[in-house]
Image: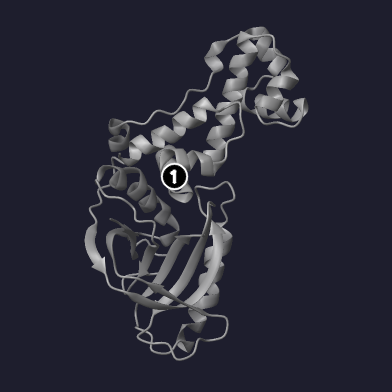
Amino acid sequence: MNYLTQVQKGVDFIESNLDYDLSFGDISKKAGISQWHFQRIFRALTNETLKTYIRSRRLANALEKLLKNDQKIIEIAITAGYESQESFTRAFKKAFNLTPSEARKIGSKNLFLKKVKFDAQYLRHINQNISLTPQIYTQKRLLLVGMKTEFYSVDSEKNNIADKLPQLWGAFVPRMGEIKHSIANVAYGIIQQEKGNTDLLEYYAVVEVTSIDQLPAGMISLEIPQSTYAKFVHKGKVTNINNTINYIYSSWLLQSNRRHSYAADIEIYGSEFIPDSDQSVTHYAIPIE
C-alpha cells in the first residue's frame, strides 16, 4: 500500500466519524502511518494542519445537518465538538459569514466545504517548479554531542519552531569549541519523534565526534545507527527549508516506492552553509527502507 492510499484511508476515517471525538492517534493508526508522519504528509499535501481540517469538516457536517433536518442548533453544536451554542456560532460565522440560524433560513448548499481528495496528478502539479533528485546513500554510524530541545513542527497547530530552534542554535554555536574530538566544518540538526503517539518532536543541534571523554555541562550525546538515507539539496536561507521538506514528503516520498523508516531526519550544515544567505546550501536527509 502506498502513502497516498494510506493518507486517503485516514481521511475516509475522518469522514466516517465526524460526529464523534477524533484523536490523531486513531486516525494515523487507521492509515497505518505513525502519528507525526501522517500529520507531516497531510500538511505537505494540503497546506493545512490536520486539526484545522477536522474542524472545518465538522463545521461543514454541521451545516449539512442545519439544511437537512430540524435538529436543535445546540445539539448540532455539541455533536460538532463545541461546548456551547455560543462558541459554535462564533466558529460557524467565521467559516461561513452567517450564523447557524441564518444559514438554516437561506438553505443554500453552495456553502458546503468539500472533502479532500488526493490523486497522483494533483501530486505532480503542486510542486511543478521544484526538481529535486536525492542522493541515496548509506549514512555511517554517527556519534554526536550537542544540545536538545523539544518542539512542535509546522504540521501541528502548536507550531513553535520559530521560538525553539533558533534559540537552541544560538545557545549551542558559541559553545561548539568546548566539545572535544569533534569533526570540524559540519554540524547537524537531528529531528525525531518523541516516544509514543504524539506530535511533539525532539531536535538536537550537534556535531560529530570520534570519541567521548566527558560531556560539556548541559550537553548530551546521541548515536545515529548506520542506515540508508535519501539526501536532498536545499538552496537559500535555512528559514525556507520547510519548502524543501514539503516537497520531500508530499511528492518524492509518495512517488518513490520508498518508505520512511521512522528513524531520525537529519539537517546537514557543511562548508556551503552561509547563515541568512540566499547563496547558502544545506542538505536534508530522511531515513528510508
Q: Which residue is mark 1?
A: 38
Measured as percent of width and height from the top left, residue 100 is found at: 69, 18
Whole-percent x and y of residue 57?
55, 27
In percent of the image, x 50 and y 39: which residue is there? 27
On the picture, is 178 further left or further right than 245? right
Question: Camera-side residue: 55 or 95?
Answer: 55
* Residue 104, image x, y percentages: 67, 11
Let me know if residue 212 appears in the view: yes
Residue located at (36% from left, 47% from top): 249
Residue 74 relative to residue 45: left or right: right
User: How many other residues sit within 10 Å of disc 1, few (<14), some (14-19) or many (≥20)?
Assistant: many
Above or below, 19 relative to 185: above
Residue 138 in the image, given as x and y percentages of width and height: 24, 67
Left or right: 85 in relation to 26: right
Image point (30%, 40%), residue name: 2
Residue 49: tell me if it is visible. Answer: no
Front one among 23 and 119:
23
What secondary structure is found at the residue carrying circle 1?
helix
Q: Nearer the viewer, residue 99 or 261?
A: 261
User: Residue 161, located in which quarter of the rendered image?
Assistant: bottom right
Q: Quadrant of the C terminus?
A: bottom left
Q: What amino acid is found at the position of numbered circle 1 in the picture?
A: Phe
Up the image or down, 22 lies above or below 284; here it is: above
From this view, report whether residue 250 is shown above or below residue 163: above
Q: Nearer the viewer, residue 266 or 195?
A: 195
Q: Which residue is depicted at the point 28% across and 47% down?
A: 252
173 up-or-down from 245: above or below: below
